[in-house]
Amino acid sequence: MKKAVSKWRSAAKSKVRRFAEFGGIREQPLNQYQSSVKKLYDGPQGAVLKFSSILSLHEPLMGQLFKSGRFDSSRFDRILDVGSGAGQIIRHLLQTAQPDAEIVGFDLSAEMLRRARERLDSDRPFFVAADMMQMPFRDNSFDCVTCGYVLEHIPDPLPGLSEFARVLKPGGVALLLVTEDSISGLLTSHTWKCRTFSRGELRDACDRVGLEWDRELWFTRFHEVMKMGGILVEVVKR
């Protein structure tokens, strides 16, 4: 009985979310939607992304995640940051990864990568502009993938997650930060023209491509208690 009630609640919540979140991601053909997202990030909204990330505290909180060692980037030799944007995650990787670790920044928008280069002012990261569902990297070529608030920009996460699994070495780790189907997440979906995820939905998708849900992370204890900040999870390629 309890399982049936839980299943019904989950289905009801999913229907409410589909109604409330930004619908264009599912209503438009994929190439048309991707073109609109690229235009969004190439334009003024993308230009102020670094400031909005700081004002929303996402970037400082992400920095604490790395600097505190709760996500230890110093254990990796080759790191791919998917959806680098304005360099929000790479900035922290440059500070916490080993000095000789290779860091590759990846984004659909070449304009965002140009902004990241200017902001970071470092010759160390290597930048590539392409589609995360067809990444131009060899199999088993990275031991870490970081991906901050990017998976929500594809209607079905499986093609993106499959690519993460493909380019990760066996035992490699991915850090996923994803917009959750909370009230704040639904507002975010309209601001950035993306979808949202439930934890169960994302976990099932990871399992299907061979990425084992290892541990959930939170920005702070307050975020954990209040269930805020989105989904932060470390997954492992087995």
Image (cartoon, rainbow, N blue to C red):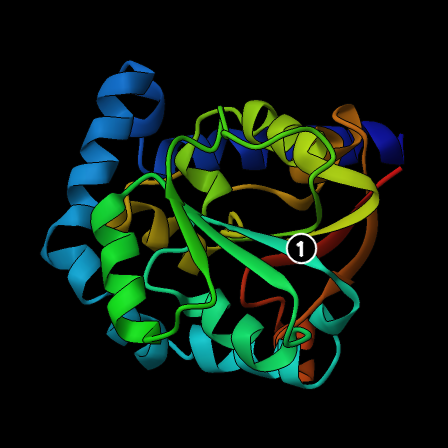
Q: Residue at x 31, y 80 (%)?
A: 55
| Quadrant (top left, top right, bottom left, bottom right) of the C terminus | top right
**Rendered position, 202 above or below 233:** above
Quarter occupied by residue 56:
bottom left
Picture coordinates of residue 112 (x, y %)? 26, 54
Picture coordinates of residue 111 (x, y %)? 20, 50
Q: Nearer the viewer, residue 60 or 95?
A: 95
Q: Residue at x 79, y 31 (%)?
A: 207
12 relative to 16 in the view: left or right: right
Picture coordinates of residue 226 (x, y %)? 62, 73
171 relative to 199 in the view: left or right: right
Could you tell me which secondary element the residue under label 1 belongs to? strand
Picture coordinates of residue 53 (x, y %)? 35, 71
- Asked whether residue 71 is in view, the answer is no
**Rendered position, 216 above or below 108:** below
Q: Provide the residue designation for mark 1.
A: 78
The amino acid type of the residue labelled 1 equals Arg
**Rendered position, 146 above or below 128:** below
